[in-house]
Amino acid sequence: METDRPLKILLVAAEAAPLAKVGGVGDVIGSLPKELAAMGHDVRIFIPRYGSVDHNRWALRPTGVERIVPLGGNHERVAIFETTLPRSPVTVYLLEHEELFGRHDEIYLGLDQQDEHRRVLLFCRGLLDSLLDLAFVPDIIHLNDWQAAPCAAYLRTSHRPLLRRGRTRIVYTVHNLQYQGRWDPSILREAGLDAGQVFTSSGLESWGDVNWMKGGIVYADVITTVSPRYAEEIQTMEFGWGLDEVLFQRRPRLFGILNGIDQEEWNPETDPHIAELYTAGTAAAGKAANRAALLEEIGLPDTPGVPVVGIVSRLVDQKGFDLIAEIADWLRDKHLQLVVLGAGDPRYEQLLKELFRTTRNVRGHIGFDLGLSHRIYAGSDFFLMPSSFEPGGLGQLIALRYGALPIVRATGGLADTVTDLDADPAGGNGISFAEYSAPALRDALQRALDRYAARKPWPSLVARAMAYDSRWSSSARAYSDLYRGALNLPPM
């Protein structure tokens, strides 16, 4: 096929910023299509219309497309609305169904709820049934995480004509392999899929369950992850969550592409949430002003020579909070000020509340506050992400953009983006450690404190961090090349 013609690309996901966003998937779907469109591609997005997506606020328009979709023994009516992704020409289609989506503000109900699987099936089948009526014939159908994976099973069976005899390719992105969408095989009756055809070791079957993510992996023409390191890690038993052998078998068609960040949303030169705007050239004064404002807001003294370490995170084991809990007493006595924003596991929420109450150097907020997250990035000297695994990671990229040096465990996207200063003094942009243990985390934090105490080179380190290229444009070029490469591969 021509190597320069614009492609028609459909991205399917459970969320897309800013319309509906919980995590990194929403950031990707809200940013990547804009960059692809800027390259000349015709890009469309398909997401559900949750109750939190207001018709008036987002100027949703009816497309006139309505379908009756079989789900189990019922026939459900869905309607397709459309709008435009802000600051872009990208069309967003939204599937509306009041009972399963409209009455819920939540994007995710929970993996253990049958309604979560039922609405994923309605979404996938409804969008595929509607595609021809929308007069959009994609070259690439790009599915994201387990919520979009049933589309791949339909496209290889009941909806195979949509692939146009192999002229359309399926790309499937694993954002987080831990969440796979496993359910009892009885769900296939609701899906309208032939169990004899798809519930096999080469299909959806995994350890006796239906595994939708496995379906996305085995039925796609190309699989991607959100970092090169994660693409390698998930082929091992340690990180494979039971799918390592399946992923290893698909190795020739498995690729890792780093995420970027929204440079308009995260920009210390224009950020309306921070106390003082700054550039790499004015970072010394700008970060000092933001640091002082953050510490005043959070209730800590601005003590010269004592670095501020920021955390903006879900409070869960994956993000390393089991390690932080182990070193809590050590943190109390260190010459650092820890500022934490997040919510999650009640154990860690309670631990942090106790530290807020009983220490002189740990403060924060349990919950989520967008403005405060911006101020933590701008006011911190270091940014801590001791994750047990991290498929891509956005926090470290935002921290670099704001001149806060990341302290990370070398895993997944963290390993791909953060280079340890001790290992590479001339090119390093943060502190990293390999072993997932409390002593290794303590050592990394101590190395960071020692680095901060040697004040002379600090401005150059901040400037180096801010020079890191985290724009989506380079990622979009990689995806564009991958799409064209997929079209030249023999179809599955």
Image (tube, rainbow, N blue to C red):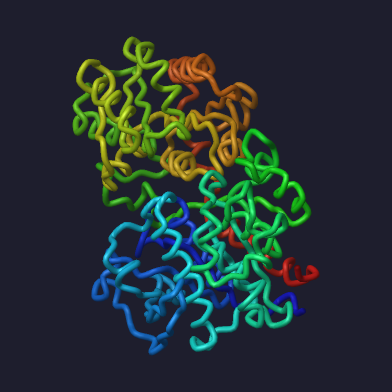
Q: Residue 173, image x and y in percent?
A: 59, 57
Q: Residue 233, image x and y in percent?
A: 66, 39
When the figure is inspected, residue 44 is found, relative to residue 231, above or below; the finding is: below
When the figure is inspected, residue 100 is found, relative to residue 301, above or below; the finding is: below
Does residue 199 show up?
Answer: yes
Residue 346: name its quadrant. Answer: top left
Looking at the rendered image, the quarter that the N terminus falls into is: bottom right
Nearer to us in this view, 434 or 195:
195
Q: Residue 63, image x and y in percent?
A: 39, 86
Is 103 left or right of 462, judged from the image as shown? Answer: left
When the figure is inspected, residue 431 is found, relative to residue 228, above or below; the finding is: above
Looking at the rendered image, the quarter that the C terminus falls into is: bottom right
Residue found at x 56% / y 37%: 414
Nearer to us in this view, 208 or 374:
208
Marks counted in the figure total 0
Is 146 left or right of 360, judged from the image as shown? Answer: right
Q: Residue 226, image x and y in percent?
A: 58, 50
Residue found at x 34% / y 67%: 100
Does residue 460 show up?
Answer: no
Q: Residue furthest right?
A: 490
Nearer to us in this view, 486 or 282:
486
Residue found at x 64% / y 27%: 424
